[in-house]
Amino acid sequence: MTSAPGPVMTRAAVILPWERPDRQDESRAAEARLEEAVGLAASIGLVIICKAVLLLRARRPATLLGSGQVESLHATVRADNIAVVIIDSRLTPVQQRNLERALGCKVIDRTALILDIFGERAATKEGSLQVELAHLEYQRSRLVRTWTHLERQRGGFGFLGGPGETQIEADRRMIGDRIVRLKRELEQVRRTRGLHRQARKRVPFPVVALVGYTNAGKSTLFNALTGASVYAQDQLFATLDPTMRGIRLPSGRRIILSDTVGFISDLPTELIAAFRATLEEVAEADIILHVRDVSHPETATQRTDVIEVLEGMARSGTIESDWQSRVIEVLNKADLLGGREAVGARPGAIVISAMTGDGLPDLLGCIDERLTHAMELAHYRIPVANGAAMAWLYEHGEVVERTDEEDGVDMYVRLSPANRARFEMQHAAGITCFES
């Protein structure tokens, strides 16, 4: 009895066209960018046979690469039996077609690669819709007169119908119709999520959102803090859809922790909208944990990429302009550098290892302290029989002092401004509020 054959592994080459000067620091940046592209390709099961940085003197309109580079790459494709070549840059439809003809294999660019990854990882309804929408918008941009099957015409109806519509026009119209339907469905999903967010505000807990470059360890940190089992792997874009869990801080205060998609440099424009679901959670967050892989050689560049995205959100009004005042930098993966002591203290940052748990108590304490600074101290006298009001304060605030008297209970409580207003509106009957 013969065993079933295993899955056929697709052999791939990853090529980074590089236009920048060949200085030592630029060479390091090119190597880091190439390794990121290799990681992207490997994350969807491609076997990377060849990887290379090709310096460009000028971008060729026909093939992007120079003729000698194309010939050399063609020889490598034939010698190593490569099925797909990934160009870590954006290709025009003409460049993609010409490279496929010259190399004799499938060619995809950075946008198509990331779209494939998003398509494989999206789990929620909105994630799937966003990815399909991005795919269609990308395909619509490829519908140019470069493939012969799109040049055929359908005949008109009867003798007076004219030449009919070309296949490319029919394809573009069908894609356009599907895009309209997808946008309508997405708007409905967003309205539903907005209702859920409003419901959370009615029973409010502070929201702490994790952001950071892809593969910085956000999901590992999320699991370590919540005890959840969110998918976390050493690969790019392991998490695409927002995940939320409730946890308690050392003070007893309850918060909601939100895991989000990882950021990446040169994100395809078609996919910017696909970040909307998770970025909306960031915009609503009371605290933003910027998780960084401190062991990565390009950690400073990755930090800049994340900040640029958030600054763009601030310019568009998606997030408040003072968002940086809500950020705590979390330097993760200290275990890969020999531990927290080896990394050393950094002003305004918490050094941790989500994998080993080292530094997590300090991080939780920092979150607690930051939330406390944003709170107001309120003084109430509550009737002894009003246990519901006292329970509400314990649940939503930090009780600093309590004194039980015969005529009532004096409570000094730290509350967020929103919770204070809500408590005084909902539990006003029989309660005395003092100026604090």
Image (cartoon, grey):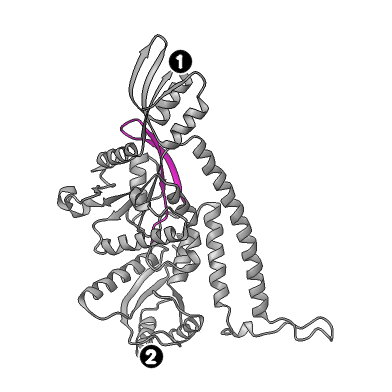
Q: Nearest the camera: 408 or 293?
A: 408
- Percent x, y of residue 129: 56, 58
How many numbered markers are drawn? 2
Q: Quadrant of residue 8?
A: bottom left
Name the residue located 42 percent from the left edge and 36 percent from the top edge: 417
Q: Is residue 124 left or right of residue 352?
A: right
- Percent x, y of residue 371: 34, 39
Query: Which residue is tagged 2?
Result: 67
- The amino acid type, in three-letter code, at marker 1 is Pro
Whether 98 is among the magenta residues is: no
Q: Quadrant of residue 416?
A: top left
User: Which circle's residue, 2 or 1, is located before the other in the chain?
Assistant: 2
Q: State the CA–CA distance, disc 2 to disc 1.
A: 85 Å
Rendered position, 372 above or below 393: below
Query: Disc 1 on helix, strand or loop?
Result: loop
Name the residue located 66 percent from the left edge and 78 percent from the top edge: 169
Query: Which residue is tagged 1?
Result: 383
* Residue positioned most to the top: 406
Q: Residues within 10 Å of mark 2 (few under 14, many from 20)?
A: few
Q: Nearest the camera: 244 or 373?
A: 373
Do tag 2 and tag 1 residues touch (Cβ < 8 Å)? no
Query: Disc 2 on helix, strand or loop?
Result: helix
Q: Nearer the viewer, mark 2 or mark 1?
A: 1
Which residues fall within the magenta stretch?
Answer: 242-263
* Residue positioned most to the bottom: 67
Q: Residues within 10 Å of mark 1 (few under 14, many from 20)?
A: many
- Percent x, y of residue 385: 47, 13
Name the residue located 30 percent from the left edge and 33 percent from the top edge: 250
Name the residue located 81 percent from the left edge and 83 percent from the top edge: 161
Whether 262 is among the magenta residues is: yes
- The amino acid type, in three-letter code, at marker 2 is Ser
